Image (spheres, rainbow, N blue to C red):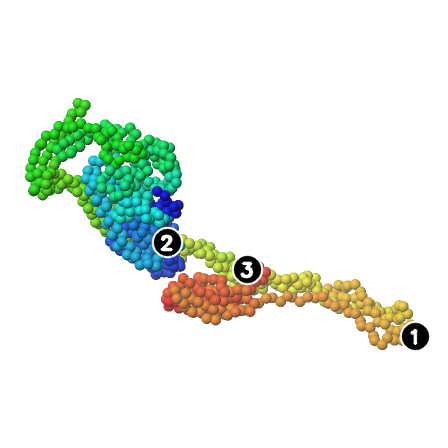
């Protein structure tokens, strides 16, 4: 039958019993939990595997629970499978697409997602399910619909088995015939086809009696699973159309089958003489080469299986080394039987005058009649119970079989013998024997309820702390729920030893050890900084030797904090008159005084220099109106450089704040480049801790009930060195909270 491309795509999705939908979960912002000591958080139904999550979903589905939460690790690969509830496709069988219509929609749209993270960065996702009212804009009683449709499919299962009372004794071929006879009630839905729609699930096909090609295919595969056959739905195309049909395994080989049973007159069948459309019945892969109009292009599918080259009716590879005695009332016939598939030796499949069609009829088995004798006859209620025994000798070997015929209604008084005990995961089997008539039959024992027990587990380490409560079956291990209550976890460090003591300029290292696990960590201790300073190496300059301003040195370590500078030596010069004379230059008379400088300390004399004084014009004798100034040589002595000073530090306020901390505020010191604080539990500041700080600073990890003393100081930078000022007065703070 013709299908539209879009219809085929729909068929492909629905044929596996579900549709993949994007979960429109409402995701909240990530919440950082377990940040502080005392924080706790509970993860309900925490699971560590997909199997555990599916067990919880199955249990809730079975018990009709609409709302529940499953918590998983955020990085697991199977979280989307949980959100889509894909486990349901394994709940009953293939092709039951009422899952997709109801339950799977409920899982997809009824799941909201919350994200959380632990202190160590591990992320968790809480999946909140509400199957009764999911966020698709609709209110759905999906569980009620699911249960109703599931009951309908279980009834179809019972009805099929009722048509095959001897299922365990039937060959694979006979099972296929029985399934196709049962499917004779399914109509091809031409109304849906011409409307461009598809009916693709086994539920609608078997319960409603209407389907298109994929619906027939899924219905056949569902019934085949019940009968114990291996079957797969196949998709391909004819020479003119897209199409779906079946591949089924018989006697170890795959064959192709068309499950669409259509009568020649188009009416509802009144018997089981049903022709197969497209004559596709247990065909091999070479069939596509023998037909034209109905050529099936499924080469990829055939390569993957692969489908047998020959048709089933041409198959000759049966192993008829086994035997079977088949009873018909009080008559018995001996047959050779294939050890692989249970097929009886026969003449093959009956054909009509048109070789492309094949009747769904039993094979004409070739057998040998057995000699039958009546063994006994008794009454069981209103019934007459007759036992027969058949015997036959074939190839010199004698075969026997007993058979019971019951005429009427028995009132069995059964003696029970448990063959297989029922567990919480598998049905049991009980064999019953009537004490009156000797009739033997078996019945299934329902699966037992799980024996749920609660197991507790606690972990308390420095990196992880939690209590876990697991509810699981003590028999099979099925996990019903697991709840994890997480606590804040961290190391509890205490001081162990000084690894390296700090100096005035170098940092030290202290070792701390965890009281719980013994883990160690190393913390740096700030350099102490230079204490009080003094001026050293001062030297006065002379006219013979340079002087030195002196170095500012730390009294503790002796290191030069501020390096001094050289003071150049300077003579104590006084001018000394050597000579006086008059000279005439350019018609002018000058009075010249010759001077030289002499050091009054060492007596050293320097090169002489002249001072000229204009007296008058030689010709006219006219004197100048202003006297020239006398040049005097200046001294060159330098004063020592001025040393740099740092202001004293001061604390504006200091107070105890929450979590055993001290918060303090420093007053600003002019010119300061930074500050230091030091604190101790004694006034003399023994074993004091020194930290570099800003104007605002918080001291942590203090002990409750203790009193602490705090001082502060400022420093400036001189080159690469720091020059520290004096410590402030101490502030006293008691830790109360």
- Residue 531 visible from this viewpoint: yes
Q: Is residue 596 above or below residue 25?
A: below
Which one is nearer the viewer's eye here, 623 or 425?
425
Instruction: Answer with mark 1 or mark 3, whichever residue precedes in sequence.
Output: 3
x and y percentages locating residue 131 in the rendered image:
30, 56
At 31% from the left edge and 32% from the top edge, which residue is drawn? Answer: 311
Residue extending farthest to the top is 396
Instruction: Answer with mark 3 or mark 2, whichever residue precedes in sequence.
Output: 2
In front: mark 3 or mark 2?
A: 2
Which one is nearer the viewer's eye here, 408 or 717?
408
Is 677 situated left or right of 476 in this image?
Answer: right
> Which residue does the numbered mark 1 point to in the structure image?
620
Disc 1 residue crowd, few under 14, some 14–19, many 20+, Cα 10 Å: few
SS class, disc 3: loop
Q: Is residue 104 above or below residue 415?
A: below
Q: CA distance from mark 1 to mark 3?
A: 78 Å
> Which residue does the numbered mark 2 point to in the structure image?
23
> Which residue does the numbered mark 3 point to in the structure image?
558
SS class, disc 2: loop
Which image quadrant for residue 533?
A: bottom right
Is 73 situated left or right of 626 in this image?
Answer: left
């Amino acid at each position: 039958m013709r299908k539209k491309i879009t219809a085929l795509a729909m068929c492909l999705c629905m044929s596996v019993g579900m549709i993949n939908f994007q979960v429109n979960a409402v995701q909240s912002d990530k919440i950082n939990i377990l940040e502080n000591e005392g924080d706790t958080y509970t993860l309900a139904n925490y699971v560590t595997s997909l199997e555990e999550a599916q067990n919880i979903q199955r249990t809730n589905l079975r018990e009709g629970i609409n709302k529940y939460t499953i918590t998983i690790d955020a990085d697991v690969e199977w979280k989307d499978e949980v959100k889509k509830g894909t486990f349901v496709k394994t709940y009953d069988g293939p092709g039951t697409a009422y899952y997709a219509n109801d339950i799977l929609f409920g899982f997809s749209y009824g799941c909201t997602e919350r994200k959380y993270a632990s202190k160590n960065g591990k992320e968790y996702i809480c999946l909140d399910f509400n199957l009764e009212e999911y966020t698709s804009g609709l209110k759905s009683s999906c569980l009620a619909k699911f249960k109703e449709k599931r009951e309908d499919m279980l009834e179809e299962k019972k009805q099929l088995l009722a048509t095959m009372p001897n299922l365990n004794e039937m060959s694979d071929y006979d099972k296929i015939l029985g399934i196709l006879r049962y499917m004779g009630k399914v109509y091809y839905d031409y109304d849906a086809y011409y409307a461009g729609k598809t009916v693709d699930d086994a539920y609608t096909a078997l319960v409603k009696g209407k389907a298109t090609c994929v619906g027939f295919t899924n219905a056949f595969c569902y019934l085949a699973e019940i009968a114990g056959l291996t079957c797969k739905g196949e998709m391909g195309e004819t020479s003119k159309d897209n199409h779906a049909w079946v591949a089924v395994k018989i006697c170890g080989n795959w064959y192709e089958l068309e499950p669409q049973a259509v009568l020649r007159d188009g009416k509802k069948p009144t018997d089981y003489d049903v022709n197969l459309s497209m004559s596709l019945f247990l065909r091999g892969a070479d069939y596509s080469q023998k037909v034209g109009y109905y050529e099936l292009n499924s080469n990829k599918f055939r390569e993957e299986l692969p489908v047998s080259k020959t048709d089933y009716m041409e198959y000759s590879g049966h192993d008829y080394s086994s035997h079977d005695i088949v009873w018909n009332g009080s008559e018995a016939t001996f047959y050779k039987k294939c050890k692989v598939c249970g097929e009886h030796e026969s003449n093959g499949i009956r054909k009509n005058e048109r070789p492309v069609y094949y009747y769904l009829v039993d094979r004409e088995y070739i057998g040998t009649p057995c000699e039958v004798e009546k063994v006994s006859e008794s009454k069981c209620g209103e019934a007459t119970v007759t036992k027969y025994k058949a015997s036959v000798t074939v190839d010199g070997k004698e075969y026997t079989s007993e058979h019971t015929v019951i005429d009427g209604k028995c009132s069995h008084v059964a003696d029970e013998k448990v063959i297989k005990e029922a567990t919480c995961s598998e049905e049991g089997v009980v064999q019953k024997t009537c004490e009156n008539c000797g009739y033997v039959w078996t019945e299934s024992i329902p699966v037992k309820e799980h024996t749920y027990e609660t197991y507790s587990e606690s972990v308390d380490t420095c990196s992880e702390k939690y209590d876990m409560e697991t509810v699981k079956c003590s028999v099979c291990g099925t996990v019903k729920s697991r709840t994890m209550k997480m606590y804040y976890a961290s190391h509890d460090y205490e001081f162990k030893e000084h690894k390296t003591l700090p100096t005035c300029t170098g940092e030290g290292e202290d070792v701390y050890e965890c009281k719980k696990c013994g883990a160690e960590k190393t913390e740096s201790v700030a350099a102490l900084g230079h204490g009080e300073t003094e001026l050293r190496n001062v030297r006065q300059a002379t006219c013979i030797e340079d002087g030195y301003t002196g170095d500012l040195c730390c009294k503790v370590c002796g290191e030069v904090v501020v390096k001094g500078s050289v003071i150049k030596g300077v003579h104590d010069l006084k001018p000394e008159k050597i000579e006086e004379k008059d000279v005439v230059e350019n018609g002018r008379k000058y009075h010249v005084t010759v001077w030289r400088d002499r050091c009054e300390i060492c007596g050293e004399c320097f090169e002489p220099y002249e001072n000229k004084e204009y007296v008058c014009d030689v010709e006219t004798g006219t004197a100048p109106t202003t006297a020239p100034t006398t040049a005097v040589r200046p001294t060159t002595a330098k004063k020592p450089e001025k040393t740099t000073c740092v202001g004293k530090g001061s604390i504006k306020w200091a107070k105890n704040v929450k979590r055993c901390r001290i918060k303090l505020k420093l007053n600003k010191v002019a010119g300061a480049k930074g500050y230091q604080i030091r604190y101790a539990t004694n006034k003399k500041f023994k074993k004091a801790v020194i930290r570099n700080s800003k104007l605002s600073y918080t001291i942590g990890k203090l002990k409750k009930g203790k009193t602490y003393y705090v001082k502060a100081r400022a420093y400036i930078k001189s080159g690469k060195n720091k020059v520290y000022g004096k410590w402030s007065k101490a502030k006293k703070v008691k830790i109360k909270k």
